[in-house]
Image (spheres, grey):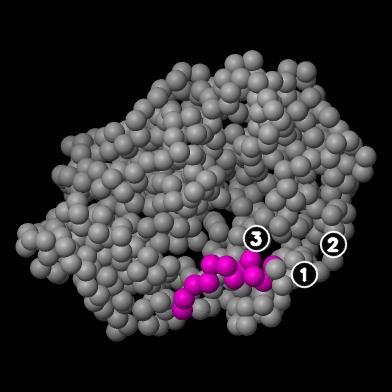
Amino acid sequence: MNTRTVYVPTPDGTALSTDVCLPDGTRPLPAVLIRTPYAREAHRAELRGWAAHGFAALAQDVRGRHGSPGEWHPYRDHERTDGAATVAWVRTQAWSNGEVVAVGASYAAYCALVTALAVPEAACDAGPDAGPGDFHHDGAPDNLRRDGAGGGFHHDGVPDAVIAAVPALGLAETAREPGGPERLWARAGWWAAHGDRRDSDPDALDRALADDPRLLEHLPVARLAERLTQSLGRELPSWSGLWADRARGRLVARGSTARLPLLAVGGTRDPFAEDTVALWRGWGGPSRLLLGPWGHRLTADPAAPARARLNLGALYVRWARAALAGRLEPTRHGAIALGDSGRWHSTRVRSTPRPASRPDVTPQDATAQLGSEWRAGAGRPETEGRWSFGSPTGLRLLHGAEFNADPDRPVRSDDLAVPADGERADRCLLLSPPLPRPLDLAGAAVARIKVTADTPCADWVVRLTALDPAGRADPLALGIVRRTGPPGEAADISVPLGTLGRRLPAGTRLRAEIAGHHFPAHARNPHTGEDPVTATRLAPSRRTVNPRGSALHLPVVARRCYVEPAPEICR
């Protein structure tokens, strides 16, 4: 096994720094390509793991980062053209058999996807429900001409399969929730660590907050970079442009025309979990979903439950071999972990997905639609459990049917403590009776609430927490949506709570909070009707929650279908 650094040319002459790790021997090999802004050196152990299993493994610094020259502009078109140039270069090498798997996590998943989705129109003729006879051995449709070199598509820059883990799908997807509110803390942390620089400083925001604990309260949000500059000692000129792009779902929509296989990997605690699910269920080719009880670092997170730890490297190798050999069924299915129970539940989408968004459909409506289609298409292994508000067997109202959402005193995202009484209530608080028996949850959850706000614009936050018999709190689900409308107008709102995968033991209570803010994870809504990114004036908002007709809807597993994740993903 040997590793060397080479410089891969791109169409404009920029040479990208690339580590190539090859196993011993001279036979042509399939290749795995990782393109990352987080330093190719960090992937050397991963490259050796792939090489040990018979792959040529490459990790490349994207343009303008670490060892690669040029200017880096996140999510610009150069990621697609540079990725295509690298895939085409791989196929010309003596050690290559022409097969390439694009692999990446977070931003690197975006790099893999935009390269994979640079597909010629001829590759998009067959639908996701095509039978095995419509495919060549590697999943390409029969009507797609091949170039005769190593089995690659006639478009030399398109890989044969893609593995996308915790995908950060674009500026709009990372900057805002599907329901509209801005992801303040995460974007400030990422831009402070990686934005407008060649290398990375992961602790930059922590140091800035130590110097200025009220940093994230600065208004307007669009000029927060000016305050960050004082702590970082450098400017962040791209910060304001982060908030300009509001068009979500472009990669997911393009994925519906794809023909190559996809493995989408995510975590139920990852902020991009719903993008992972949407990518999987909308993909046009064979697609697999692996959704564990993880955050953005997946199994590398020390807090990941021990019983839910998987050897993801071994699973990736097994899936890549199956994908390249054409052994994957032309379906969409996968596995969701039931929390830290060690159990995995099978999930499948049978129906052809409808468009995730239309001009007359709000983001939260689209997300709820996807969830209902998923349940309906999965052969109904889940049933919808309804916890009605104000019901002794559902969610009992403790206090806060009327509350004040004050952006100067917002409900905090970093504190699970709740007020003991309803004096000067800042949220609506509800509690269920103890569960009489264990409860498995797998699928999309939603809160449907009847509410009123006395301001023209209001964010509605629903935070669901599991309380064990000793009263210890464990976050279960969170949803946040933005609504605009005449002040005082009653509204029925659906708040998607994401995809759940949990086993709740008997005796667990469900606590639901409905609030107007979730700060500093999300920017404060000023309640004036102004854009929260540019607003400089904040106003309180008086809220009302009507328990009648409001309910929490959870995906209860009615027919247990436990699976081993690796065989399920690789069939």
Classed neighbour count for the residue bearing mark 1: other residues with Cα under 10 Å, few (<14), some (14–19), many (≥20)? some
Residue 148 in which image quadrant:
bottom left
Please state the horizontal and vertical placement of residue 326, each as a whole percent of the image: 19, 43
Residue position for label 3: 185
Residue position for label 1: 219
> Magenta part of the protein: which range?
198-209
Left or right of 69 on screen, residue 496 = right
Near-viewer residue (220 or 354)? 220
Left or right of 178 on screen, residue 526 = right
Near-viewer residue (420 or 252)? 420
- Whether residue 11 is visible, yes or no, is no
Please state the horizontal and vertical placement of residue 551, each as a whole percent of the image: 71, 28
Q: Amino acid at mark 1?
A: Leu
- Whether residue 367 is visible, yes or no, is yes
| Label 1 secondary element | loop
User: Can residue 200 be found in the magenta stretch?
Assistant: yes
**Mark found first going from the N terminus, 2 or 3:** 3
Q: Residue at x 37, y 65 (%)?
A: 42
Residue position for label 2: 538
